[in-house]
Image (tube, rainbow, N blue to C red):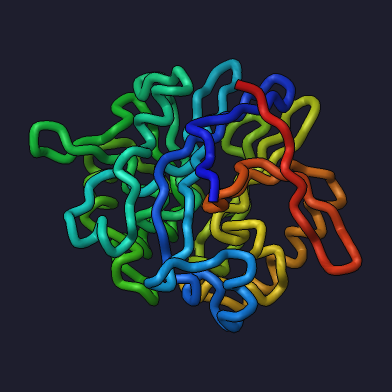
Amino acid sequence: MMAPASYASLDLGGMRVTTINAGRFALDGGAMYGVVPRPLWARVTPPDDRHRIPMACNCLVVETPHECILIDAGLGQRFDARAREIFDVDTDSSLQNGLSRAGIDPEQITHVLFTHLHFDHSAGALTTVADKVRPTFVNAQHLAQDGEIDDGLACRSIMGSSYVPSDISLLRTATRLEGISGDTEIFPGVHVEVTGGHTEHHQAVWLRGREQTLVYPADLLPTRHHLRPYWIMAYDMFPHETLTVKHDFIRRILEQDCIVAWDHDPLSPFSHLRKTPDGVEAIDIGTMP
């Protein structure tokens, strides 16, 4: 399978959106597709000899006239040898390398917006310098839903390693990690919507430019294959909520002809959706350097 490019950009009209390849890794295919039988999911994402499938961490940088916002921070590089082997972490791809190739200095980032605080979405917000863990984005305000911060600190998860409470504590003390309360427009054209499902306070991000709208559904729709109704991750805290919410979410994307930015799809970062007799499919769209 071809690896995604380090970065790719779209102009929404007064708002430039760049997807950053912040890391490649692998997860158990059965966990990614929940109740779906292996013979079905293995046709579209063939696993390796340890039943793992390839994943990407696709983060977004949103540039407006006044802000430079990073949406999610990927899984970082602070893995010991055992964890690198378990998750098959690609040591050549990272958030900082991706930003550098896109010509974006970490000091330019004004805000880091987390869809949720699982390690593969937040660990890259911290980095190790001289054997000390420090914030990656020293000038940035960090934002997540209030309830997500509380759940992360308490490690409320069906998988114990999903949250790293010590990371969240450090973000809260060493950065301006602040809570968001519910659905809101946090900047002009940048809206967050609590979806639940994956975690109780998981949120999607809508970006509305003058010409186009883009949505980052995060782990409500982590890959194009999760457009299928019952293809739901075993990691989801509230799978029935995922089922019902994503049905409505997909309907709205189709009605508004939005661009979808995938957070974990290893094939392409941006797609339009199209309804077919067999369901909804993703049509990849062109990008600019």
Residue lying farthest to the left in this orientation: 131
Pick the front one: 172 or 279: 279
Residue 135 position in % (x across, y down): 26, 35
Residue 203 position in % (x across, y down): 56, 54
Q: Is residue 95 visible?
A: yes
Residue 209 position in % (x across, y down): 73, 28
Is 269 on the left or on the right of 95, as rendered? right
Pick the front one: 10 or 86: 86
Image quadrant where residue 154 sits: bottom left
Name the residue rendered at 60%, 51% in the picture: 204
Name the residue rendered at 47%, 38% in the picture: 21
Can you say whether 270 is above or below 28 in the image?
above
Residue 262 position in % (x across, y down): 60, 48
Quarter of the image with the C terminus in it: top right
Name the residue rendered at 67%, 29% in the picture: 287
Pick the front one: 83 or 62: 83
Q: How many marks?
A: 0
Residue lying farthest to the right in this orientation: 277
Name the residue rendered at 80%, 61% in the picture: 280
Q: Is residue 237 visible?
A: no
Is 142 on the left or on the right of 79, as rendered? right
Can you say whether 177 is above or below 240 in the image?
above
